Image (cartoon, rainbow, N blue to C red):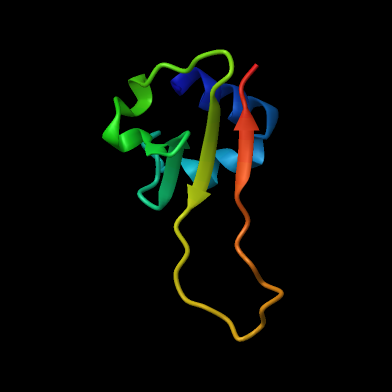
């Protein structure tokens, strides 16, 4: 999984400060799911991905808005 995130931030460098803190630790509000499993419940950064694995990055969201057009977005980054 570490390699997949490195590839992602290499392709989209503007994401890096949103995903990692100043000490290169994943920010606490960033949730990563392998299938339906939170990687924190697996082996964290050491979780192995298969060629057909899908890693989902889901930021925690707090607060709300009366404007229903402001929905949450989930982005799936297929590996391979």
Quarter of the image with the C terminus in it: top right
Please indicate whether residue 32 sits to the left or right of residue 7 in the image: left
- Against 48, residue 63 (above or below) is below
Q: Residue at x 60, y 50 (%)?
A: 74
- Residue located farthest toward the bottom when viewing the structure as drawn: 66
Quarter of the image with the N terminus in it: top left
Q: Residue at x 49, y 52 (%)?
A: 59
Please indicate whether residue 6 sits to the left or right of residue 34 in the image: right
Please indicate whether residue 27 sits to the left or right of residue 75 in the image: left
In the foreground, 39 or 63: 39
Q: Find residue 55 and report its horizontal and vertical position in percent.
A: 53, 32
- Residue located farthest toward the top when viewing the structure as drawn: 51
Q: Quadrant of residue 32?
A: top left
Q: Residue at x 57, y 13 (%)?
A: 51
Q: Quadrant of residue 16?
A: top right
In the foreground, 9 or 36: 36
Q: Find residue 39 and report its horizontal and vertical position in percent.
A: 36, 33
Q: Find residue 2 and report its horizontal and vertical position in percent.
A: 45, 22
Q: Find residue 4 and report its horizontal and vertical position in percent.
A: 54, 22
Q: Residue at x 69, y 28 (%)?
A: 11
Q: Quadrant of residue 67?
A: bottom right
In the foreground, 23 or 72: 72
């Amino acid at each position: 999984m570490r390699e997949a995130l490195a590839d992602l931030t290499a392709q989209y460098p503007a994401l890096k400060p949103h995903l990692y803190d100043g000490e290169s630790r994943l920010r606490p509000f960033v949730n990563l799911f392998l299938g339906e499993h939170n990687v924190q419940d697996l082996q964290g950064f050491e979780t192995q991905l298969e060629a057909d694995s899908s890693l989902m990055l889901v930021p925690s969201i707090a607060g709300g808005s009366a404007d229903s057009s402001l929905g949450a977005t989930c982005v799936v980054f297929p590996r391979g």
